[in-house]
Image (spheres, helix red, strand yellow):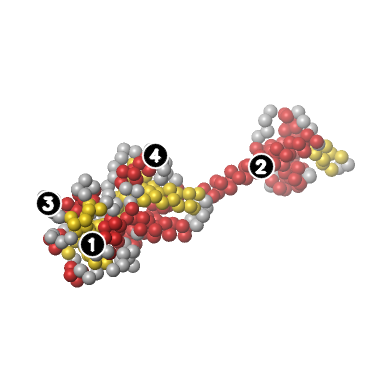
Amino acid sequence: MLLNLRQIEVFRAIMLTGSISKAAQLLNVSQPAISRLLSYTESRIGLVLFERIKGRLYPTPEARRLYQEVEQVHNSVQRVNEVATDLIEKRHGSLHIAVSPSLGQTLIPMAVTRFRKAFPDVKVYVRTLISSDLVQALVTQQAEVGVAIVPLTHPSLHAQSIYENHLVAVLPASHPLADKQELDATDLEGLDLIGYGNDTPYGQMVQQLFGNRPGVPQLAVEVRLTHIACAMVQAGAGIAIVDELAVAGRVWPDVVVRPINPRTTMPLHMLYSNVVPVSQLAHDFMEVVISTASRGMRAGWA
């Protein structure tokens, strides 16, 4: 017969305390219950584990040998309980996230900071990826949570719109249009614009801003990523059209940001698997991202 965990627990308690009565106190059960379980265990395994000599209980050599293995089992059970507690209280672990490049400079650093204040022992891995690579990272479970500027779809992913992002203009602080509090799309026609190819989601959104008219806008500089566009503006190469989250947090000095009419929405999306359950840490992080986005924009990302 194999010992079960209860029998192991009672045997270990007797070995530690040296008596039936003290083992009963340690386990908070009655002394007769300990005696009955010990007798039952000895009869089923066919070994005498303890002998009473002059009123005291002594373990047999077989018991001492068995105790060496029992301690290993006990330590393993303790470790299981510790891991379970850590998981419940989220004290340890890791979280892998994949994000659009522009968010890696703005929203995500703010969200990660808030998340780690709540869970300081959790290690966060952040990968900034273009759209196709971001989807691939989530589908192959290299990342558990994705945050993307452009709408992304895949049959294995759930996409949740979490914030109504908008296109804005980024201008050098010395530009004549910087004095205007709002710009119209027509204000930007004929100027040196920094933008994106028509084969990209960003390029298509910019086309929508200009009414999808052929040949508009004419780009002076074409880039793939919004933070490159902002760097071009900072260097004086022209005016860029980006999403408002790309310039959140005042990460680009010497430039100004102005809303553009008509307002063009580019929602922020949270993505995660709809095939494999996500961890509680992932759910907690997603809540932090949502609250950070809404709180940050209400505060003007100061």
Dots 3, 1 in contact, CB < 8 A: no
State whether residue 148 appears in this view: yes
Q: Is residue 261 above or below residue 88?
A: below
- Element type where label 3 sits in the image: loop
Q: Which mark is drawn over residue 215?
A: 3
Q: Given the current orientation, which residue lies at the most extreme left position?
A: 214
The mark that comes first in sequence, 1 or 2, is 2
Which quadrant of the rendered structure holds the C terminus? bottom left
Amino acid type assigned to the residue bearing label 2 in the image: His
Q: Residue 76: x and y, percent?
A: 63, 42
- For the point 31% across and 38% down, the residue is 155
Q: Residue 250: x and y, percent?
A: 32, 65
Mark nearer the viewer, 3 or 2: 3
Dots 3, 2 in contact, CB < 8 A: no
Amino acid type assigned to the residue bearing label 4 in the image: Thr
- For the point 35% across and 41% down, the residue is 136
Amino acid type assigned to the residue bearing label 1 in the image: Ala
According to the picture, the residue beneath numbered tag 2 turns out to be: 74
- Element type where label 4 sits in the image: loop
According to the picture, the residue beneath numbered tag 1 turns out to be: 237
